[in-house]
Image (cartoon, coloured by chain):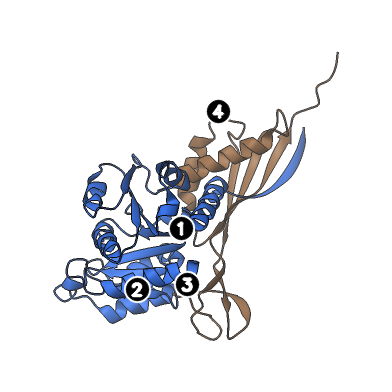
Chain colours: A brown, B blue
């Protein structure tokens, strides 16, 4: 439901970064999204097409990398990936694990841009 | 044409997170405990809050509330009957509260004169989980009419909560509410979380809930 506002923040943030590269066009935007971030990729992709129209991001590709949920298991003394979002337990020892270490990320990892040619003097 | 990869490593909700961090600093400096209430529509956030505001005032504590809804100021009017200062935030279609809306609606309030500030979020178990409002405690509500598997269906929200309140306990029996299963499901998603079982109507369970709020405020000072 809030994917459009998330994508609008992505577009604003990328536009800000583009200020350092005058005339550049964006080819690709890569996001890192945790499995517990409450966003749906299809919906992000749909909104991306709309939000990038008439911007230097138009026609670029949105790549969404989903990060699994990792918790810290105290008895095992290590970070482990949970097997299901319906059970926050260590898959090794079966103990409940409340200490979340990964899964809420909502980040722009990088962008790929095509820089404008240097202006050639007369 | 040169192609270049620019590493950004930047939070998408950075603007909200920064505003929320600023609010959290203000709240801590003022010594006000801020509680963000989240649930589905109709779970009973407003009913729990009405009773909480009234009972905390009876205990001599200074309370205020911000209440979020898409439209109408019905909830603010209900809550204001407690005598506490209350402001309505109308989001006009936005499905969650953001830190900026909270900051804007605090203008003119003397936070130092408050012990508690409650923020009743828009009824929605998905989107509000992504937006930090600068609160110290996020409380998720689940009513006995909603089904014991709500925590499993909405793990993102339940996992992000600091405490859970089961509401409408007075009608648990006619609803066939399986209490043990609900508690098990909440704990599967958020191991070790404090759970309160309340009825805002009869007042059952309210003492434990209020004691928790008082304890948490004690930790702050």
Using a 10 Å C-alpha cutoff, classify the residue at mark 1 as few (fewer than 14 neighbours), some (14 to 19) or many (20 or more): many
Using a 10 Å C-alpha cutoff, classify the residue at mark 4 as few (fewer than 14 neighbours), some (14 to 19) or many (20 or more): few
Give the spatial CA distance, label 4 vs label 1.
Answer: 38 Å
Chain on which label 1 sits: B
Secondary structure of the residue carrying tag 3 is: loop
Q: Is residue B90 left or right of residue B20?
A: left
The answer to whether any part of residue A94 appears in the image is yes
Question: Is the C-beta separation of discs 4 and 3 under 8 Å?
Answer: no
The answer to which of B121 and A13 lies nearer the viewer is B121
Please name the residue that numbered disc 2 is placed on: B211
Whether marks 1 and 2 lie on the same chain: yes
Please name the residue that numbered disc 3 is placed on: A84
Question: Is the C-beta separation of discs 2 and 4 under 8 Å?
Answer: no
Whether marks 3 and 2 lie on the same chain: no
Q: Nearer the viewer, mark 1 or mark 2?
A: 2
Give x and y (percent) for residue B144: 23, 70
Q: Specify the label residue B38 is tagged with.
A: none
Give the spatial CA distance, label 2 vs label 4.
Answer: 55 Å
Chain on which label 4 sits: A
Q: Specify the label residue B135 is tagged with.
A: 1
Chain on which label 3 sits: A
Chain on which label 2 sits: B
The answer to which of B162 and A92 lies nearer the viewer is B162
Determine the image quadrant of residue B141.
bottom left
């Amino acid at each position: 439901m809030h994917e459009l506002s998330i994508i609008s923040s992505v577009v604003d943030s990328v536009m800000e970064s583009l200020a350092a590269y005058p005339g550049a066009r964006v080819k690709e935007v890569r996001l890192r999204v945790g499995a517990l971030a409450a966003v749906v990729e299809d919906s992000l992709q749909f909104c991306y097409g709309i939000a990038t129209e008439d911007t230097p991001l138009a026609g670029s590709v949105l790549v969404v990398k989903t990060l699994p949920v990792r918790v810290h298991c105290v008895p095992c003394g290590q970070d482990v990936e949970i097997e299901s979002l319906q059970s926050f337990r260590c898959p090794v020892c079966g103990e409940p694990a409340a200490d979340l270490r990964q899964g809420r990320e909502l980040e722009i990892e990088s962008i790929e841009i095509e820089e404008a040619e240097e202006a050639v003097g007369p | 044409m040169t192609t270049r990869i620019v590493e950004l490593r930047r939070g998408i909700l950075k603007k909200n997170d920064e505003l929320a961090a600023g609010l959290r600093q203000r709240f801590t400096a003022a010594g006000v405990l801020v509680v963000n209430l989240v649930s589905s529509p109709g779970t009973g956030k407003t009913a729990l809050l009405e009773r909480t505001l009234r009972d905390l005032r009876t205990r001599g504590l200074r309370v205020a509330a911000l209440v979020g809804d898409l439209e109408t100021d019905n909830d603010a009017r209900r809550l204001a009957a407690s005598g506490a200062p209350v402001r309505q935030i109308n989001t006009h279609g936005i499905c969650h509260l953001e830190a900026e809306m909270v900051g804007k609606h605090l203008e003119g309030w003397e936070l130092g004169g408050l012990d508690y500030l409650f923020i009743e979020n828009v009824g929605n178990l998905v989107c509000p989980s992504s937006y930090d409002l600068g609160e110290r405690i996020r409380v998720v509500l689940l009513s006995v009419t909603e089904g014991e598997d709500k925590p499993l269906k909405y793990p993102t929200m339940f996992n992000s909560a600091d405490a859970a309140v089961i509401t409408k306990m007075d009608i648990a029996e006619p609803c066939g509410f399986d209490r043990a299963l609900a508690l098990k499901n909440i704990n599967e998603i958020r191991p070790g979380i404090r759970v309160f079982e309340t009825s805002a109507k009869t007042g059952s369970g309210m003492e434990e809930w209020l004691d928790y709020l008082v304890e948490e405020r004690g930790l702050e000072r």
